[in-house]
Amino acid sequence: MRTTLDLNDALLVRAKAEAARKQTTLTRLIEEGLKLRLEQDEAPPEQREPYRVRVFGDPNGPKISHEEFMARVAAIEEEDDRRQLGLLAPRDEDQAA
């Protein structure tokens, strides 16, 4: 079946180069990619490629649960709200700005 695709220019250049390197056509390369993606989406979770989370900061730093993290965020936000309402003195770094 024929169809028209609107592809990002840089992606198309990379795809054409990859097709040439593999000595195949752009059509076959796109078909392979679609097939792989559709098969991956249909696979049971244990057979899927693992989702990778990008971690910022020290990976060896302290480990806290999501609940503890959210409690700390809430405490910081509450403190900021109290400062904005004038119920707490400004922080030193706030006064320097």
Image: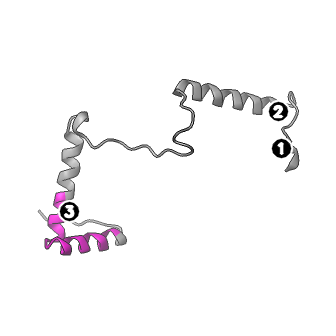
Residue 72 rendering spot, x and y as whole percentages? 64, 28
Image quarter of residue 77: top right
Q: Is residue 52 magenta?
A: no
- Disc 1 marks a residue whose amino acid type is Asp
Q: Quadrant of residue 42?
A: top left
Does the segment drawn in magenta span residue 20?
yes
- Which of the pair 57/27 is nearer the observer? 57
Labels 1 and 3: the sequence-earlier one: 3
Circle 1 or circle 2, nearest the eye: 1
Is there a contact, CB below 8 Å, between mark 2 and mark 3?
A: no
Q: Which residue is mark 3?
A: 30
In the rendered image, residue 84, in percent from the top left (x then y), is placed at: 82, 35
In the rendered structure, which amino acid carries the disc numbered 2? Arg
Residue 60, image x and y in percent? 53, 39
SS class of the residue under badge 3?
helix
Determine the secondary structure under disc 2. Answer: helix
The residue furthest left is 1
Local crowd size for mark 1, using a 10 Å CA cut-off: few (<14), some (14–19), many (≥20): few
Q: Looking at the picture, which amino acid does disc 3 mark?
A: Ile
Foreground: disc 1 or disc 3: 1
Q: Earlier in the sequence, mark 2 or mark 3?
A: 3
Task: Give the residue furthest to the front.
Answer: 60
Q: Earlier in the sequence, mark 1 or mark 2?
A: 2
Q: Which residue is mark 2?
A: 83
* Residue at image coords 43%, 43%: 53
Q: Which residues are magenta?
A: 11-32
